[in-house]
């Protein structure tokens, strides 16, 4: 084990180096340290420190733990080491037995060993540190089995084909035959989908060889599921027949194939066709159904989504002339508000989502528009003069173009649904010259992760 005194002697010999933080000159990796964990970072990794102030980042370690950890790497820019957890000496008071048999190999739930009440307190503290006037933080009604969708990848091993997710910080696949946060109906399909996926050679994202890239499964709150195989080519007639035989089940409403040939981090390709059954299912977590397929965005936690949509309706009120929903996806917010305004417009860049939305025959009009440079959304706002604009952007937050549109007097009221409170804080700061927040609340859409949903409403400043 590397003694701290040895570390300090090494560092003292390096003091002539720029930024003394070039710990890569000091640490070769593999050294074992005793560390007391002081806090969690934004990714819910444990953070401890050495006597000289060097941070040590350790996944799966919790505040209050004393642990042994192995150094894996050193930051080239900060006094920071990254280490892996070897053992826990004295456990933290918030530590509970893991509910997951493959944690931390699968690190999709970094809170798998954190007491759920403690998790919600941490998230509430994050929300109020960013927004001191924030209101309630709503815990998830279902901390387990809440995931209504999942993605699995495949890999051939000496033991045979396995189906699951990537091991933490690697491209090695770990089997996920039992995932306690995913709905049991989805998990019941794991063995059947594994047989279906193993028909194809797994895709290798380094060489570009192989056929099977991934499979998406989505379940609506009524129990119907849609399964999408992402392949690099169209399956042969024999492969189609085998897929149909394996995947014909009472609760599978449809199976589709998405063709994705590029070596890229983008999850799906532009071409998708129905293998059998339906091309999408309808979600009914509020009073107006909306379409769900593999590529259109849908919320992962139906119970919490329903709670948020009800809250949005409450704050939106009634007797509005026009509601504009930006980053509308497949339209859950626009459709939830469809009876509260004379006109409701949903703006979305995905042509497939727009086509599905307009096929519903609802009161909502879906428009295809990319809300970036050159967008026509500003002209739409000027023409329609909406009295409520709803936005539900990706984690990166609102684009500069949308911020500019809103600050140009887009609407009296802005409703903002965000899965990233940090970009929401940035955007709220950019809007503050014209808008005042009148509601900020948190909702635990993603139990056992550091992520949560935030709902905010902003009111245009009154002008004399």
Image (cartoon, helix red, strand yellow):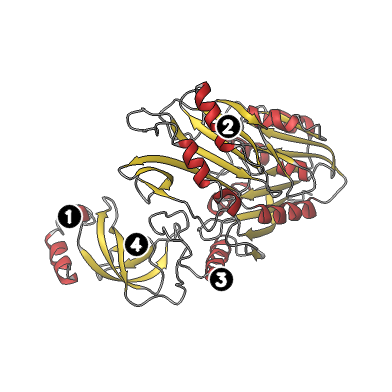
Q: Read off the residue under disc 3.
A: 117
Please, is residue 395 above or below residue 378 in the view? below
Number of dots carrying numbers: 4
Asked if the residue under mark 4 is in contact with the one under mark 3, i.e. CB atoms within 8 Å, the reply is: no
N-terminal of the pair, mark 4 or mark 1, is 1
The correct choice, above or below, for 50 with respect to 212 in the image is: below
**Left or right: 266, with 307 as reference point:** left
10 Å neighbourhood of mark 4: few (<14), some, or many (≥20)?
many
Image quarter (top left, top right, bottom left or bottom right) of the N terminus: bottom left
**Residue toward you, 244 or 136:** 244
Rendering quarter of residue 128: bottom right
Q: How dense is the environment of label 2, judged by Cα within 10 Å: few (below 14), some, or many (20 and up)?
A: some
Q: How far apart are marks 1 and 2 (CA)?
A: 52 Å
User: Could you tell me how far apart the alpha carbons at marks 3 and 4 are, in whole angstroms?
Assistant: 22 Å
Using the numbered discs, state the Cα–Cα distance from disc 1 to disc 3 in whole angstroms: 39 Å
Give the camera-side residue of 260 and 432: 260
- In the image: residue 76, left or right of residue 106: left
- 3 or 4: tag closer to the N-terminus: 4
Distance from disc 4 to disc 1, alpha carbons, whole Å, reads 17 Å
Q: Mark 1 falls on what kind of element?
A: loop
Which residue does the numbered mark 4 point to in the structure image? 58
User: Which residue position holds label 2?
Assistant: 244
Mark 2 secondary-structure assignment: helix
């Amino acid at each position: 084990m590397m003694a701290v005194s040895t570390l300090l002697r090494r560092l003292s010999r390096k003091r002539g180096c720029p930024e003394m933080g070039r710990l890569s000159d000091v640490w070769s990796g593999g050294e074992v340290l005793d560390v007391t964990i002081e806090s969690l970072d934004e990714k819910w990794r444990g953070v401890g420190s050495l006597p000289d102030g060097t941070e040590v980042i350790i996944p799966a370690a919790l505040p209050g733990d004393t642990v042994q950890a192995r150094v894996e790497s050193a930051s080239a820019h900060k006094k920071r080491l990254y280490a892996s957890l070897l053992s826990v000496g004295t456990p933290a008071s918030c530590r509970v037995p893991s509910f997951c048999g493959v944690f931390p190999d699968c690190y999709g739930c970094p809170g798998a060993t954190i007491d759920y009440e403690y998790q919600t307190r941490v998230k509430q503290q994050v929300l109020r540190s960013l927004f001191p006037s924030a209101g309630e933080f709503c815990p998830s009604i279902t901390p387990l089995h809440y995931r209504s969708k999942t993605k699995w990848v495949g890999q051939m091993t000496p033991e045979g084909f396995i189906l699951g997710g990537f091991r933490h910080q690697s491209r090695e696949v770990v089997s996920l035959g039992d995932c306690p946060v995913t709905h049991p109906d989805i998990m019941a399909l794991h063995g059947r989908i594994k047989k279906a996926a193993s028909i194809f050679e797994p895709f290798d994202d380094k060489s570009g060889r192989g056929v099977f890239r991934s499979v998406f499964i989505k379940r609506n709150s009524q129990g119907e599921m849609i399964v999408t195989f992402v392949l690099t080519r169209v399956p042969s007639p024999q492969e189609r027949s085998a897929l149909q035989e394996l995947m014909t089940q009472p609760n599978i409403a449809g199976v589709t194939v998405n063709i994705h040939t590029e070596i890229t981090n983008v999850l799906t390709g532009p071409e998708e066709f129905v293998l059998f059954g339906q091309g999408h299912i309808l979600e009914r977590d509020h009073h107006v159904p909306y379409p769900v397929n593999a590529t259109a965005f849908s919320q992962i936690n139906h119970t919490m989504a329903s709670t948020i949509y009800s809250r949005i309706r409450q704050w939106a009120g009634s007797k509005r002339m026009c509601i504009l929903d930006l980053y509308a996806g497949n339209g859950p917010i626009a459709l939830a508000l469809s009876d509260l305004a004379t006109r409701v417009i949903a703006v979305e860049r995905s042509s497939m989502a727009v086509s599905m939305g307009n096929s519903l025959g609802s009161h909502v009009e879906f428009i295809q528009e990319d809300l970036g440079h050159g967008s026509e959304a500003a002209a739409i706002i000027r023409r329609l003069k909406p009295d409520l604009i709803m936005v539900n952007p990706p984690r990166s937050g609102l684009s500069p173009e949308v911020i500019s549109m809103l600050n140009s007097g887009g609407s009296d009221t802005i409703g903002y649904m965000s899965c990233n409170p940090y970009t929401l804080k940035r955007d709220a700061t950019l809007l503050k010259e014209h808008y005042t927040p009148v509601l900020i609340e948190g909702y635990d859409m993603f139990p056992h992760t550091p992520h949560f949903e935030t709902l905010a409403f902003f009111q245009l400043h009154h002008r004399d």
